[in-house]
């Protein structure tokens, strides 16, 4: 095997695939699948797929393992390792510009730089030195810096300020996540943090693994070869951080924590940068900059004030704002007030603890707030999420938006809350804890519960309104949504509804967690019900979290129908994540609980989804049995929408069996039912499948018309997955009509949508369509590339039919390129796939194989 010439990553991947084919011939048992390689190595399937398709260059240790598993001889292993190192060196030396990586987002997530940042020159120099050490050669390990120090000492400010200074050295982007490690209620687990980081890197929906280790592997794969800076703020433990570390030495990580993170230093090579209290000259300099000319007139008093704030930056900023808010008072008078406040605080019994001093500063600042602002500050300590807006404040304080906005402006000026993005706010965890303490002292238990109840009502009411606007509310499964209040966000149109849901989803997860065990279980169940179809559109990890909380809440109250709904939601999320066995387990539980509750509507839903699972597995008879039972039950309870869904799936089963007339009959009935019930999403889905079935009977013009109708609806309601599916089907129709160039236009539009929402199974279908269009245009090399990408994705997500279709396309491409042996290999895989799916396509593939010469050995 020649590996001596200069190669690219794609060339190297081609050599790996050639090894894989040779190994398959030697063992006479087919190629090692991506899943088999993943099982043998412990890597993720996604990582294996990206290595073998050239999307990612394997790290040296993994590359050596991979070529060994693929049967490379010792000589070949050495030559391949050399080739791999040359590719890595060439890529390292190639200048890269921000945003140039095709199809890969370039996140810029750093919070705004800190106003009037002062001092910390030694620490900044140490951080700069971390990068300077590796300036002369490629780094061999991930650069990690651990910033540690007490609460309020300015760790986040330093990390963010330095990150802005060096951002241009990381052209592939900067990631930021607040781990909330010291939040007593909602610290962020590694799984949730990885989900957010992966989403920022373009991974979402069905491509997000469930397991933390799988997520970490996918995260490392996404970062491989990229120059990125990752800021992991406010970590509680080493265990919270370690899964978030990249595996590529081109990345740098800054971690902030109150803990010294000794394990990160000892095992992962982190360099510790410790922050103590600001030296007195720097603390005075910060007050001088924040207070202005008045400070110059009273330098000794400024030093006293700095010491009263324990030289903690957070306390210094709060105190400076108190000074600027009272221009008529001398700094000496303000310092005397603060000193008196400290003496009278019981917390000052912990003499020498800087946190006692900062609490005194908070107390002093809050004491001088107008009563409405002080009450708002206290109530914000009851919010379970990380961020909030004026509507949340209005709900907590039982006031209107204008008043809530005014109080937030007051608290922001006092540095008691901080603006994160326009219209959204957060609190330092010390301030949040202090606010919660004040609420427990100054608000009655009844008052606290009423405030939280108003907040949860507002979130539930807005969620219900948003899903109504998006046509995602289920008429037969209406959540008990409270009436709109001052805290309910007014949503003008579907775009505003979707924006609100996407933005508030982390808060909705936090609300579900809090209400499930905090005394509002019915809210949790209703929130799960209201969000069901929205979450079903691609937010599968959050769906698992919310529906799991709802299941627990329903069990607490003995709500059997609520249990059935939440179990169904969990099962559907697993189905979207291609975990069919776990999906079936939860769906059967949902069916059993619904039967015990006598809830025929939920029984019908569970049966319908079970039928869909069996259909996806290629088991047509069991699928049809479940779907007929679902349809009968839905008819008994008068649920047109559920009957329509069962008919759609029955039509799809019949189409897969080649019974297109029967399929069209089912789908036309579904369209009629959805029109009667004004369910636009259901109608569009039925029209899409109807168009697909009509295409199989060569009714191309009718198919195109139905697909265009569906596309218009999907676009109106903002259903991106439906839009991608329909565009793909329109491409197929135009290909059948002999219009390959027009087909390419539709396929390309579909591909853009798939990649925007990360809908990987549909992407595999679209790539296969592009491959078939390329073959129709006489471009077999392009067809080969498209079908290869389709196969990689379909294998990764365990989508059997697109795998068989990709093998078919690869067979045609190799045949056109004069390689009958490879063509036979892929046609044989296609035949096995279609036979397992009981598809009529198997006969046409069998006929093709009969025309190819036999291959020796």
Image: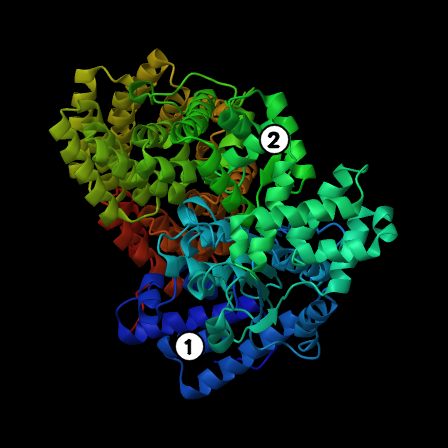
Position of 655 with respect to 271 (left or right) is left
What numbered label is drawn on residue 438? none
Mark 2: which secondary structure?
helix
Name the residue nearer the viewer: 211 or 191.
191
**Residue at horizontal 29 percent and vertical 26 percent from the top:** 645
Instruction: For label 1, count other residues whose C-alpha is less than 10 Å away and answer few (under 14), some (14-19) or many (20+).
Output: many
Give the residue at mark 1: 67
Q: Quadrant of the image for the C terminus?
A: bottom left
What numbered label is drawn on residue 373? 2
Please state the horizontal and vertical placement of residue 5, each as a whole percent of the image: 60, 79
Disc nearer the start of the sequence (1/2): 1
Instruction: For label 2, count other residues whose C-alpha is less than 10 Å away and answer few (under 14), some (14-19) or many (20+).
Output: many
How far apart marks 1 and 2 lie (CA) works out to 65 Å
Please state the horizontal and vertical placement of residue 656, each as a whole percent of the image: 27, 37
- Residue 470 in view of the camera: no
- Asked if 118 appears above or below 516 in the picture, the reply is below
Name the residue nearer the viewer: 831 or 549.
549
């Amino acid at each position: 095997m020649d590996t001596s010439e200069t190669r690219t990553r794609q060339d190297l991947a081609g050599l790996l695939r050639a090894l894989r084919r040779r190994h398959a011939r030697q063992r006479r048992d087919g190629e090692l699948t991506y899943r088999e390689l993943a099982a043998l190595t412990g890597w993720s399937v996604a990582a294996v797929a990206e290595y073998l398709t050239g999307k990612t260059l394997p790290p040296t240790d993994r590359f050596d393992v991979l070529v060994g598993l693929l049967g490379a001889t010792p000589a070949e292993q050495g030559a391949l390792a050399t080739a791999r190192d040359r590719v890595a060196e060439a890529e390292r030396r190639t200048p890269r510009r921000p945003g140039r990586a095709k199809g890969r987002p370039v996140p810029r997530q750093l919070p705004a730089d800190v106003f009037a940042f002062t001092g910390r020159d030694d620490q900044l120099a140490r951080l700069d030195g971390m990068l300077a050490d590796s300036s002369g050669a490629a780094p061999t390990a991930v650069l990690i810096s651990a910033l540690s120090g007490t609460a309020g000492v300015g760790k986040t400010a330093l990390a963010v300020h330095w990150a802005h200074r060096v951002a241009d050295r990381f052209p592939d982007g900067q990631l930021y996540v607040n781990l909330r490690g010291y939040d007593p209620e909602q610290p962020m687990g590694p799984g949730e943090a990885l989900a957010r980081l992966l989403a920022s890197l373009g991974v979402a929906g069905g491509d997000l693994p469930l397991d933390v280790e799988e997520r970490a592997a996918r995260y490392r794969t996404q970062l491989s070869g990229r120059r990125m800076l990752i800021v992991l703020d406010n970590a509680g433990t080493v265990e919270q951080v370690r899964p978030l570390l990249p595996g590529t030495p081109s990345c740098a990580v800054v971690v902030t924590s109150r803990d010294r993170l000794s394990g990160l230093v000892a095992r992962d090579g982190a360099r510790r940068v410790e922050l103590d209290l600001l030296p007195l000259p720097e603390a005075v300099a910060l007050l001088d900059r924040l207070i202005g000319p008045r400070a110059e007139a009273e330098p000794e008093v400024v030093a006293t004030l700095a010491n009263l704030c324990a030289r903690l930056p957070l306390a210094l900023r709060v105190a400076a704002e108190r000074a600027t808010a009272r221009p008529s008072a001398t700094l000496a008078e303000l310092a005397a007030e603060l000193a008196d406040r400290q003496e009278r605080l019981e917390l000052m019994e912990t003499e020498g603890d800087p946190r006692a001093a900062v609490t005194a500063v908070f107390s002093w600042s809050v004491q001088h707030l107008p009563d409405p602002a002080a009450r708002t500050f206290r109530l914000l300590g009851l919010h379970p999420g990380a961020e909030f807006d004026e509507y949340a404040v209005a709900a907590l304080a039982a006031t209107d938006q204008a008043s809530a906005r005014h109080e937030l402006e007051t608290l922001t000026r006092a540095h008691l809350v901080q603006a994160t993005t326009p219209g959204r706010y957060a609190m330092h965890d010390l301030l949040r804890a202090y606010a919660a303490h004040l609420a427990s002292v100054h608000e009655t238990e009844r008052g606290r519960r009423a405030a939280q109840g108003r907040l949860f009502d507002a979130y539930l009411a807005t969620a219900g309104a948003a899903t109504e606007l998006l046509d995602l509310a289920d008429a037969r499964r209406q959540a008990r949504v409270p009436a709109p209040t001052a805290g309910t966000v007014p949503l003008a149109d579907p775009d505003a509804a979707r924006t609100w849901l996407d933005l508030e989803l982390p808060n909705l997860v936090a609300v579900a967690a809090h209400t499930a065990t905090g005394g509002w279980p019915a809210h949790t169940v209703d929130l799960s019900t209201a969000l069901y179809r929205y979450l079903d559109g691609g937010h599968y990890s959050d769906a698992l979290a919310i529906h799991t909380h709802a299941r627990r809440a329903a069990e607490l109250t003995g709500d059997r129908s609520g249990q059935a709904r939440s179990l169904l939601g969990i099962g559907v999320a697993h189905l979207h994540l291609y975990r069919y066995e776990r999906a079936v387990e939860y769906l059967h539980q949902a069916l059993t609980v619904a039967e015990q509750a006598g809830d025929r509507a939920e029984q019908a839903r569970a049966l319908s989804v079970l039928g869909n699972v069996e259909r996806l597995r290629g088991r047509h008879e069991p699928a049809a049995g479940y779907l007929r039972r679902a349809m009968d039950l839905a008819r008994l309870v008068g649920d047109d929408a559920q009957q329509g869904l069962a008919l759609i799936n029955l039509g799809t089963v019949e189409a897969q069996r080649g019974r297109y007339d029967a399929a069209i009959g089912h789908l036309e009935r579904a369209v009629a039912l959805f029109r009667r019930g004004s369910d636009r999403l259901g109608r569009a889905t039925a029209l899409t499948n109807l168009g697909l079935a009509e295409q199989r009977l060569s009714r191309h013009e009718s198919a195109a018309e139905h697909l265009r109708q569906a596309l218009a609806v999907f676009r109106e309601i903002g259903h991106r997955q439906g839009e991608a599916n329909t565009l793909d089907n329109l491409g197929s129709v135009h290909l059948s009509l002999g219009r390959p160039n027009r087909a390419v236009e539709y396929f390309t539009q579909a591909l853009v949508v798939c990649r925007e929402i990360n809908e990987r199974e549909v992407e595999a279908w679209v790539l296969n369509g592009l491959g078939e269009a390329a073959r129709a245009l006489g471009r077999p090399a392009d067809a080969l590339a498209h079908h290869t990408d389709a196969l990689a994705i379909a294998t990764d997500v365990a989508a059997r039919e697109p795998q068989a279709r990709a093998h078919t396309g690869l067979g045609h491409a190799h045949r056109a390129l004069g390689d009958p042996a490879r063509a036979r290999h892929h046609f044989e895989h296609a035949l096995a796939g279609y036979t397992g799916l009981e598809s009529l396509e198997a006969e046409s593939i069998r006929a093709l194989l009969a025309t190819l010469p036999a291959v020796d050995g």
